[in-house]
Image: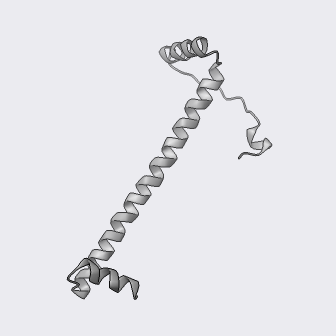
Amino acid sequence: MHTLLQLEKQQVGLRLPKYLVDEIDAFTQEYSLNRTDIIVEAVKSYVSEQKAKIFYDEFDSSAKELKSVLSSKAKEQKLQSLDELIDELEHN
């Protein structure tokens, strides 16, 4: 949740291509919204997608690093099977 202070609105000026303004205006008429509502939802969606992308990119990087570490550990100890690797990890 956001605090009341965080929910306070601040005016921001921006320039958009005319075709995009026309598309936004079409939505405003079709769904009885105003430009601000549409732009706010678009920005929230974009920010959310970028946060998810960062999270999954970091997760992917961590998974690759873990795989590399496990692979090198298995080579160092000449483990023959996945069961031996799991056993080694559980006991160290």
Q: Residue furthest right?
A: 4
- Residue at the location (36% across, 70% down)? 66
Q: Nearer the viewer, residue 39 or 12?
A: 39
Q: How is the image coloured?
A: one colour
User: Total label count?
Assistant: 0
Q: Is residue 89 left or right of 79 when viewed as pictured? A: right
- Residue at the location (57% across, 22% down)? 15
Q: Nearer the viewer, residue 40 or 14?
A: 40
Q: In the figure, 24 relative to 2: above or below?
A: above
Q: Is residue 8 left or right of 51 when viewed as pictured? A: right
Percent of width and height locating residue 56? 43, 53
Q: Residue furthest front?
A: 83
Q: Nearer the viewer, residue 9 or 28?
A: 28
Q: Nearer the viewer, residue 16 or 28?
A: 28
> Which quadrant is the C terminus positioned in?
bottom left
Percent of width and height locating residue 57? 41, 54
Q: In the figure, 58 relative to 4: above or below?
A: below
Percent of width and height locating residue 39? 59, 26
Q: Is residue 60 left or right of 21 when viewed as pictured? A: left
- Residue at the location (51% across, 15% down)? 23
Percent of width and height locating residue 22? 52, 12
- Residue at the location (27% across, 75% down)? 71
Q: In the figure, 3 relative to 45: above or below?
A: below
